[in-house]
Image (tube, rainbow, N blue to C red):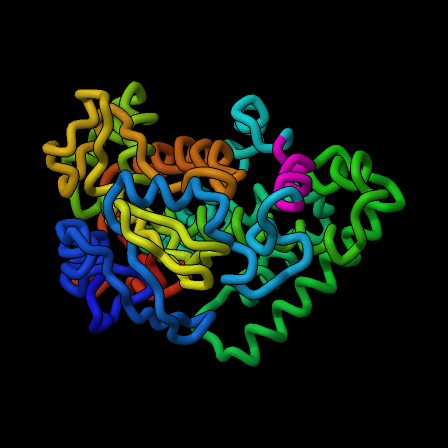
């Protein structure tokens, strides 16, 4: 392995194009030897890690049970990212039934109502609006309200509190204060479900497994679903819209050809890869391409880079394809945006459904939609925990 560590931003994104991997990641894909890097993180501070960027290598390490998520990230009771092994499997099993493809389809009418309401809000702002607070953020927030059983009377305040808790532009102190308010609200919501479990994700977990979980674990599950279901989907929406506005030919296909919706969503997920390179920690010595990673070392696997180098025995997934080009008609590839292995994203089918409903509806309602500022002036979150756009001013 290389002896002098390079520095790799936690987002791993190029300065010249926020949707592309850094040159360091492309170089790491070509290197025969794995690279050790220094990674500055807003959550963990700077840490040393082995970087993995090739598709097959990333897939391998994400599937390896000896690479632990728990211990590499701050512990939070009930948060699946804090657990590995049998305990992770036990908690995940309690939630799996609520996030199936069938359940996502059942939620489609509710998602369509939420999207229609958000579109009306955009129209009321017009003929110009910032899509992040008016469209991208409210949709996943209100869908999560459905999933958690947040009463209708609480939803407006819930939206405001969630937005403040997840606003990375405010000070750390304010963010912590709002996060504490959300934790207190979630504890109260758990208490309501303890008394009368609702027909929703949190209510079902309480009803079926409440005797096996503490209140703090249940509140942690609720907050995990809130953050994962809100921040990642809102960010993917904003990034996807910004990307399509840069590619009007691809936007036109998304808007006008319903048969292309599913492939378009998969291509946008592959291309934007919003989740950052979360570290894992080796619980023993492991090998990647016959090279050792020692016990206790951290590993960062770049899904963003891996998605640009997909290889497979399937000829349609030939690594020679131009995967740096956006093509919404591309047959869906086995991208790793939702991860792989034990920690693969639990809510991926719900995320897909929200994108399938929201994106065509936005461009159909506003067929002349365009950015209200030059593309290069858009403010991207390239080094945040989740990639997205801070502000997306548009006009029509």
Residue 76, x across and y down, in percent? 63, 61
| 70 relative to 103, above or below | below
Dominant secondary structure of the magenta stretch?
helix
Residue at left offset 45%, top offset 50%? 232
Residue 117 in view in this figure: no
286 in the magenta segment? no
| Nearer the observer, 172 or 337 | 337
- Which residue is rendered at x = 56% and y = 65% of the image? 74
Location of residue 197 with respect to 5 vertically, above or below: above
* Position of residue 1 in the picture relative to residue 293 (left or right): left
Residue visible at 39% across and 60% down in the picture: 294
Q: Which residues are magenta?
A: 87-96
Task: Judge from the rendering whether residue 295 lies leftward or rightward of residue 325; answer left or right.
Answer: right
Q: Find residue 40 and report its horizontal and vertical position in percent.
A: 35, 72
Q: How many marks?
A: 0
Q: 117 or 210: nearer the eye?
A: 210
Residue 184 visible (yes or no):
yes
Give the image location of residue 369, x and y in percent. Answer: 25, 45
Residue at 49% x, 44% y is: 65
Quadrant for the N terminus in the image: bottom left
Where residue 286 sits: x, y (%)?
39, 50
């Amino acid at each position: 392995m290389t002896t002098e560590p390079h520095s790799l931003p936690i987002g791993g994104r190029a300065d010249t194009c926020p949707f592309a991997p850094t040159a360091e990641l492309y170089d790491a894909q070509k290197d025969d030897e794995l690279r050790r890097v220094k990674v500055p993180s807003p959550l963990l501070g700077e840490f040393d890690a082995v970087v993995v960027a090739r598709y097959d290598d990333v897939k391998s390490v994400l599937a390896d049970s000896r690479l632990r998520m728990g211990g590499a990230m701050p512990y939070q009771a009930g948060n699946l990212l804090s657990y590995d092994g049998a305990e992770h499997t036990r908690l995940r099993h309690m939630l799996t039934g609520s996030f199936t493809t069938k359940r996502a389809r059942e939620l489609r009418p509710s998602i369509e109502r939420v999207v229609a309401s958000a579109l009306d809000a955009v129209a009321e702002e017009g003929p110009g609006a910032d899509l992040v607070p008016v469209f991208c953020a409210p949709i996943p927030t209100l869908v999560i309200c459905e999933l958690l059983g947040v009463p209708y009377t609480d939803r407006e305040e819930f939206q405001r509190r969630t937005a403040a808790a997840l606003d990375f532009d405010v000070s750390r102190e304010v963010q912590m204060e709002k996060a504490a308010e959300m934790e207190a609200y979630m504890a109260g919501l758990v208490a309501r479900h303890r008394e009368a479990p609702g027909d929703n994700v949190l209510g079902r977990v309480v009803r079926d497994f409440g005797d096996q979980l503490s209140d703090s674990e249940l509140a942690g599950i609720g907050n995990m679903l809130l953050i994962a279901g809100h921040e990642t989907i809102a960010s993917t929406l904003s990034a996807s819209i910004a990307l399509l506005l840069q590619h009007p030919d691809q936007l036109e296909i998304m808007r006008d050809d319903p048969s292309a919706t599913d492939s378009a969503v998969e291509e946008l997920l592959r291309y934007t890869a919003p989740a950052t390179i979360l570290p894992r920690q080796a619980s023993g010595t492991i090998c990647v391409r016959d090279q050792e990673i020692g016990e206790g070392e951290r590993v960062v696997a770049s899904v963003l880079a891996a998605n640009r180098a997909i290889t497979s025995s399937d000829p349609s997934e030939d690594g020679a394809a131009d995967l740096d080009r956006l093509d919404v008609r591309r047959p869906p590839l086995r991208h790793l945006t939702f991860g792989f292995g034990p920690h693969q994203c639990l809510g991926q089918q719900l995320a897909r459904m929200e994108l399938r409903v929201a994106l065509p509806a936005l461009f159909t309602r506003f067929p002349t939609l365009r950015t209200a500022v030059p593309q290069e002036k858009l403010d991207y979150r390239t080094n945040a925990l989740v990639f997205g756009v801070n502000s997306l001013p548009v006009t029509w």
